[in-house]
Amino acid sequence: MPVCHIYNSSGMRLVRFSTEAYEQTGRISIGRSSSCNVSLKGFAQSYISREHFVLDKRAGLWHIQDRSHIGIMKDAVKVKSAPLEEGDIFRFGQLFFCYGSTAGPSDYDLCWESEDFGHEGRAVLWPGVNSLGASKDNYVCIRQGEVSRFHALLSVKADSLSFENSNRNIVSFLDGTKLDTTPNRLSTRSRLILGDVPVHVQKVSRQVEADEGSTAQSQEQLSPEEVLAMQAKLTRKIPFPLLCLLIFSFGFLAFLMIMLYILLL
């Protein structure tokens, strides 16, 4: 029976369940409410509906049905209802529902220099079509610089990557060339700029969830609070030398202000 997973935009698996446990009822509700069969309470932001979508079995096939106010997306297109196939991935908010053992993050991340001092922005790219932009209603949300709300589409098919602007008014550059809406092939060596924000694609090695001792496997046993604590630990901190430099700078500035005050008395 198909196994289902729910991930966040960083590629951390939050929930794993099998449709086999719901064969008799033929219905699985997923949402923020604790009364859902699969409750995302503790994981989901408030824009995730109490019952966001349901899986129901019809004529031997599982279907997905949107029940939310923000919708669910497949390949960056809003879907109201659809039969499920092995490998399907649906986005809802900044969470991702993956149907089947082959469904999950791609081998690529999109990276950019964050405006938060000392931090790097990073988000998983998913097999299929990924929307990029400043709006949170995107697969990859980059809320800085001149990035448009719905800036571009980045498609991943195995090791083949392509990029295209969402419309002719969008400003993007690839290896120094201004782009139009024509799809362009990408690689990990490509120099891509969205508006005025440089980004690059990075190939990564992800843990295999089937490994019995893997971190991803152990997350199945964690409570929502424990997963959130793990996410906080994974957040990159300001490097210690940089922190010391900042403290010294503020201290020196305070010393100068005190000396100036004394001299003016």
Image (tube, rainbow, N blue to C red):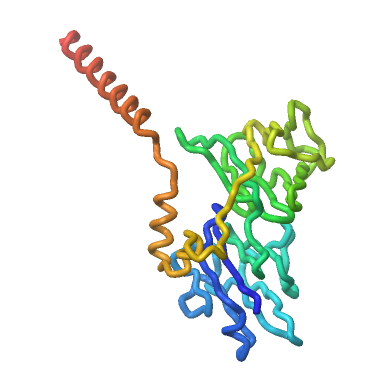
Residue 43: image location, x then y, percent:
47, 63
The image quadrant of residue 202 is: top right
113 and 204: which one is in front? 204
Residue 144 at x, y = what percent? 57, 38
Residue 87: image x %, image y %?
71, 66
In the image, what residue occupies the spot 66% across and 40% down? Answer: 201
**Could you tell me which quadrant the N terminus lies in?**
bottom right
Quarter in which the C terminus is drawn: top left
Number of numbered tags placed on the structure image: 0
> Would you place residue 79 above or below residue 247 in this image?
below
Image vertical order of residue 145 relative to residue 79, above or below: above
Residue 193 position by quadrant:
top right
Report the residue at 71% width, 34% height from top. Answer: 190
**Which residue is more in the foreground, 88 or 77?**
88
Q: Residue at x 64, y 66 (%)?
A: 98
Residue found farthest to the bottom: 24
Image position of 178 (left or right of 197): right
Q: In this image, 223 relative to 127: left or right?
A: left
Q: Residue furthest front?
A: 212
In the image shown, does 20 or 47 lie closer to the viewer? 20
Compared across the picture, whether 175 is left or right of 3 comes to right
Residue at the extreme right: 182
Q: Position of residue 258 (x, y in %)?
A: 20, 17
Say which residue appears at 71% left-offset and 77% top-offset: 63
